[in-house]
Image (cartoon, grey):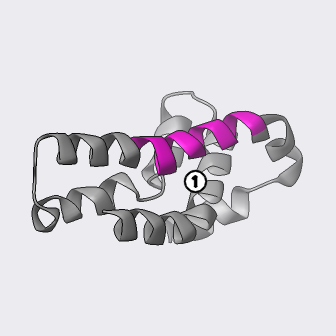
């Protein structure tokens, strides 16, 4: 339900000025965070069976709750919508990448 609300509030006109920052946030969430997590798991010799649930969480897209929180605390809900939408679309490819690598 939350993704439907977010999709309904998505405006490509509002997305355009936030595209670079949303791309950076998406890169951090879907690529950098799981990479750091995987590095630390390997560094501490944690077995893949034990860190797989954590990798799934680290590689997951931005939570839809971000939009509601941004709206409630006076943040930028349009930016939150952009990041959630881009992360959700790209995460289908990055999930496979990280789970194969892990």
Q: Can see residue 18?
A: yes
**Is 76 inside the magenta-drawn segment?**
no
Apparent side of residue 89 relative to residue 94 in the rendered image (left or right): right
Q: Position of residue 53 (x, y in %)?
A: 21, 64
Find out whether residue 31 is within the magenta segment. Answer: yes
Left or right: 102 as drawn, with respect to 20: left
Secondary element at image label 1: helix
Image quadrant in which you'd find residue 74: top right
x and y percentages locating residue 48 in the rendered image: 17, 64
Q: Position of residue 84 (x, y in %)?
A: 58, 53
- The residue where tag 1 is placed is 84
Q: Position of residue 96 (x, y in %)?
A: 45, 72
Front residue of 48/23: it is 48
Q: Image quarter for residue 93? A: bottom right
**Taken as a whole, is the magenta stretch helix, strand or loop?**
helix
What residue do we see at 29% from left, 42% from top? 39
**Side of 102 relative to 77 (left or right):** left
35 left or right of 24 in image: left
Does residue 16 sit above or below 50 in this rendering?
Answer: above
> What residue sits 10% from the left and 60% below the top?
47
User: Which residue is located at x 10 percent, y 52 percent?
Assistant: 46
Is disc 1 surrounded by few (<14), some (14 to 19) or many (20+) residues within 10 Å? many
**Residue 22 or residue 49, whichever sits in front:** 49
The one of 32 and 87 positioned closer to us in this rendering: 32
Span of residues in magenta? 20-33
Residue 68 visible: no
| Position of 33 relative to 12 (above/below) | above
């Amino acid at each position: 339900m939350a993704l439907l609300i977010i999709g309904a509030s998505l405006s490509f006109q509002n997305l355009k000025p936030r595209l670079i920052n949303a791309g950076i946030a998406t890169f951090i969430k879907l690529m950098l965070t799981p990479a750091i997590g995987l590095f630390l798991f390997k560094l501490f010799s944690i077995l893949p069976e034990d860190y797989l649930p954590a990798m799934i969480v680290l590689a997951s897209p931005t939570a839809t709750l971000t939009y509601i929180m941004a709206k409630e605390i006076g943040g930028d809900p349009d930016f939150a919508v952009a990041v959630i939408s881009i992360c959700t679309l790209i995460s289908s490819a990055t999930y496979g990448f990280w789970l194969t690598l892990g």
